[in-house]
Each structure stands twice: as structure tokens, then as C-alpha cells.
């Protein structure tokens, strides 16, 4: 094989090599575009459930009724629940807030409020009954 | 465009493989018609008439790929 033959071979090899590279890469790009287009949907065609996953609503302090107990701020959204809580005395209100809104155990509340655990339990039961009564009475008003 | 079915000369290939800028430009120039063809898309205007459109994103990507591939070409 003389030099010029060798050069010719390389020239042709290079030519076809480049074309193959380009062709394959173009194919990859087309496939990629196609894959993306299949997953592409218009925002308008999302269902409500999908919307909710993707969006958040602003929430403002004014939408809530705030209770303060032992340096915790507790925000209550439901107006009826808030009213019912208002109707309780301070101690019962605290116990309810701490146990149901902050998920504290009776023992934790007892240490925090300096009470016996049974007292907490007793007040809690009472408070729940009062709440139930209050809410049943006022349910029809709203 | 079809008439120039020339092939790149050996010296240019060797230079391009070793990273010479001018030679690389020549290579890109040589394959530009092919790259254009690969990055073409048929789009439709508002009257439904088809027209060819070159996707520059695809074109750039192909060019980059070609440059990388050329530097890896083995001169055996």
C-alpha cells in the first residue's frame, strides 16, 4: 500500500466516521425530543388533583384564630372549633390546645402545667364534653 | 449543493485531529450542509404551508459532538 492509498483510505474513513457520528447524535436528539414531547402536557389539561400537588395557596394569619398558651402560638382555622375553645376556661383551653394541637401526652402537659396527670386527664375529659355540647348547640347557627 | 461531493484532504484531517483551529473550522464547514440537513424541521405557518426551519439548538449540539469526535479520531 503506498502513501497516497493510505491517505485516501483515511480520508474516506474520516468522512464516514464523521457522518456516522452526526447521524447517531442526531438520532439521539430526536429520540430525546420525542420522549420529552410525550411527557409534555399543557397546564390547562391537568386535573384538579394534579394542580393541587403543584400549587400552594398563600395562607395568612388573618385566616386563623390565634390562641396563645405557654409561649406556643396555635392557629385554628375552623371558626366553630375556635368559638368552642373560646368558651372554655383558660386551664381547660390550655390542656386541649396542648394535647390536640401540639400532640403532647398527658404526662408532658402535667409537667408543663405543674399538675398531676390525673388532673389533666380529668380536665381534658370535662373539656371535651363541654366542647361537644357547645358545638352541638352552635352547629346549626353557622 | 449536491455538486460538491468532495472529500476532505488528508492534511486537513491530520491537523484537525491534533486540534488545529483552522483545520477544525474547515471540517465544520465541510459538514455544515449535512448538519443543516439533520437539524432541519418541517414546520407549518399559519396558513398550513410547510417550511423548513433549522433548529439552532440541534445544530450547535451536532457541531459540538463533531468536534469532540474528531479529536478522538484514530489515525491508524
Image: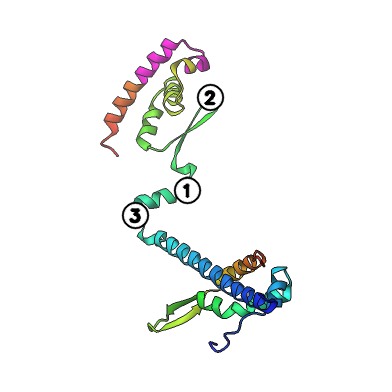
Q: Which residues are magenta?
A: A109-127
**Drawn side of residue A29 relative to residue A100, left or right:** right
- B18, A98: nearer the viewer: B18
Report how many numbered discs are placed on residues in the image.
3
Q: Position of residue A83 (x, y in %)?
A: 38, 32
Q: Position of residue B76 (x, y in %)?
A: 66, 66
Residue at the extreme front = A1
Viewer-side label of 3, 2? 3
The earlier-in-sequence mark between 2 and 1 is: 1
The majority secondary structure of the magenta stretch comes to helix
- A126, B57: nearer the viewer: B57
Give the letter of the chain under mark 1.
A
Tag of residue A49? none
Q: Looking at the image, is B14 positioned above or below residue A136?
A: below
Give the letter of the chain under mark 3.
A
At mark 3, the secondary structure is loop
Residue to which mark 2 is pinned: A70
Residue to which mark 1 is pinned: A58
Q: Is residue A23 part of the magenta span, yes or no?
A: no
Residue to which mark 3 is pinned: A47
The coloring applied to the image is rainbow
Amino acid at each position: 500500500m503506498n502513501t497516497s492509498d493510505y491517505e485516501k483510505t483515511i480520508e474516506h474513513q474520516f468522512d464516514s466516521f464523521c457522518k456516522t457520528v452526526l447521524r447517531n447524535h442526531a438520532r439521539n436528539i430526536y429520540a430525546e425530543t420525542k420522549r420529552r414531547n410525550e411527557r409534555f402536557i399543557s397546564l390547562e389539561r391537568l386535573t384538579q388533583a394534579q394542580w393541587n400537588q403543584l400549587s400552594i395557596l398563600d395562607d395568612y394569619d388573618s385566616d386563623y384564630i390565634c390562641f396563645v398558651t405557654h409561649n406556643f402560638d396555635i392557629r385554628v382555622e375552623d371558626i366553630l372549633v375556635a368559638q368552642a375553645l373560646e368558651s372554655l376556661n383558660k386551664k381547660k383551653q390550655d390542656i386541649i390546645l396542648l394535647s390536640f394541637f401540639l400532640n403532647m401526652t398527658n404526662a408532658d402537659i402535667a409537667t408543663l402545667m405543674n399538675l398531676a396527670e390525673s388532673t389533666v386527664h380529668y380536665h381534658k375529659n370535662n373539656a371535651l364534653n363541654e366542647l361537644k355540647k357547645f358545638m352541638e348547640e352552635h352547629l346549626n347557627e353557622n | 449543493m449536491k455538486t460538491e461531493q468532495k472529500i476532505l484532504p488528508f492534511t486537513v484531517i491530520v491537523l484537525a485531529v491534533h486540534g488545529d483551529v483552522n483545520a477544525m473550522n474547515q471540517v465544520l464547514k465541510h459538514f455544515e450542509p449535512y448538519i443543516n440537513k439533520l437539524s432541519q424541521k418541517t414546520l407549518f405557518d399559519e396558513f398550513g404551508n410547510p417550511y423548513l426551519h433549522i433548529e439552532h439548538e440541534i445544530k450547535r449540539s451536532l457541531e459540538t459532538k463533531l468536534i469532540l469526535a474528531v479529536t478522538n479520531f484514530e489515525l491508524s
